[in-house]
Amino acid sequence: MEKRGRNACWKCKERRVKCSLEKPVCGNCARNQHQCQYGMKLLWREEAMARGICFGRQGVHGKSSKTSLRSHSPALNSYRGHFYFFNASADGFLNQHRSLEDAVVGQDQSRPQLALCAPSSFTHEDVPEEDYQGQMTLYQTRISDFATASPDGDPLELHLFDFYITTLCPNLSNSRTENPYLEFIAPLSLTSAPLYHSVLSWSAHELSFRNPGERSYRQISAHHKVRALRGLRQEIESSQSSAASTSSNSLASVLATMIVLSCQEIVEACSSTWIAHLKAARMLCSILWPKGHDVPDSFRRFCIMWFVSHEIMSRTAWIQETLFEPSEWFAGDDETEIDVMIGCSRGLIQQLSETSTLITDMRNQPTCPSNSAAFMARRNRIEAALQRLGQRISTTKGSAPPELSDIAESKRLCALIYLYTCIDSATPSSPVIQTLTARVMRILTKLPPRPSLTFPLFVVGEAISQYYKSGGGGQSRVVG
């Protein structure tokens, strides 16, 4: 059998036969009535993991042993306390002697029945109080009002989705009453297959982190991520081909999928690969809202705030082009009000963006007296703005936690550390850096774990690490 060539069509490469290279259809594909396609065929890293093959030249040659994604599925008794229901009412939770099947009310017989993982004789007397409260959280999200994206009621998929609702979501927001991951992404995921699979992939990855000995979760995460990426590509192509008829819900689900995939990329590898989603989201945001699609304003605020804040924060780790300019997307917003989702004000995000832009300009433009004077003027304006920036909790929203002001203040101090370190070349042993670091540490020691503390921990951790690498000693000098 003749070997395939580098320029062969996809089908001939797959069959490992020599391609005649005729276009648009080669001889082999014409003879066997196959679809003939030329060009580069991209392979996602997660797809290679799911198929059990090497990704490019990574690792050794040949295929690794394939493991069934279902071979290490958790035992059914591990679902103890997880109720999966459809159109359930609160009565189903409160009546201890009523079976779960009787709690299903008003169900459309044409819709598939969800498989119950617990025995029908299982009552609330067997459920610990904390587990019972977790199930009430699931009911309060009103997820049961939507048709599930898992038509066969796969117990493992339902377990992953329940983990997202009851465990992941509560830890993604600083507020107990305002949580876009529950309010928007969870309902949308039950009407969008790509978003649904991205949520399952994220849950499986988190479970693999919590259960390092259970390797099947990593494969399950890769499997659902491949399906999410494929579905996302199809939805984007569909929206481009029929832009006039594309619904706002479809574009909203695409943006939500990009947010979930970006979250997983950030926590999975801490790399910049999620920037690809950010660039695509920038184009979609320009298409979605200027054209007047009927999208809830709260969902728009969530998407814009997520993309803008994550891009600006990421620019403090590596310098890159600005995709979401805060002055453009935050126009007309209150710059002093602390946003519950990100734990700081829009004014602070604006100053961080200007600092990163100044760093880029100083590196790219030649050094001359006129440029140096202009750079120094910009630097002084940023410092003055950060020094006088007053961040306040909204008086019209009663859901903000009391520690939100301390979180915002720690980020403001870290923005000053970022300015002095990157613009003034201040070292971790400099008195100003040690003073600011000590102030941030005093704030962090009295705060509970919050999702918005990643940036202060990164800045302070980097400052302390560089201090000890430079030969500094005495922890009290750094952390006060």
Image (spheres, helix red, strand yellow):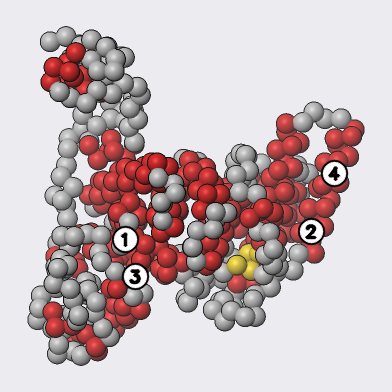
Q: What kind of element bears circle 1?
A: loop
Q: What kind of element bears circle 2?
A: helix
| 382 w.r.t. 38: above or below | below
Question: Which residue position holds label 3?
Answer: 166
Percent position of residue 389, x then y: 76, 64
Specify which label sits upstream in the sequence, 4 or 3. Answer: 3
Q: Quadrant of the C terminus?
A: bottom right
Q: In which quarter of the image is the N terminus?
A: top left
Specify which label sits upstream in the sequence, 4 or 1. Answer: 1
Specify which label sits upstream in the sequence, 3 or 2. Answer: 3
| 34 w.r.t. 85: above or below | above
Question: Which residue position holds label 2?
Answer: 385
Specify which label sits upstream in the sequence, 1 or 3. Answer: 3
Pointer 4 with pointer 3, Cβ within 8 A: no
Residue 84 versus residue 416: which sits nearer the camera? 84
* Side (left or right) of 109 relative to 400: left
Q: What kind of element bears circle 3?
A: helix
Distance from the alpha carbon under mark 2 to that under mark 1: 44 Å
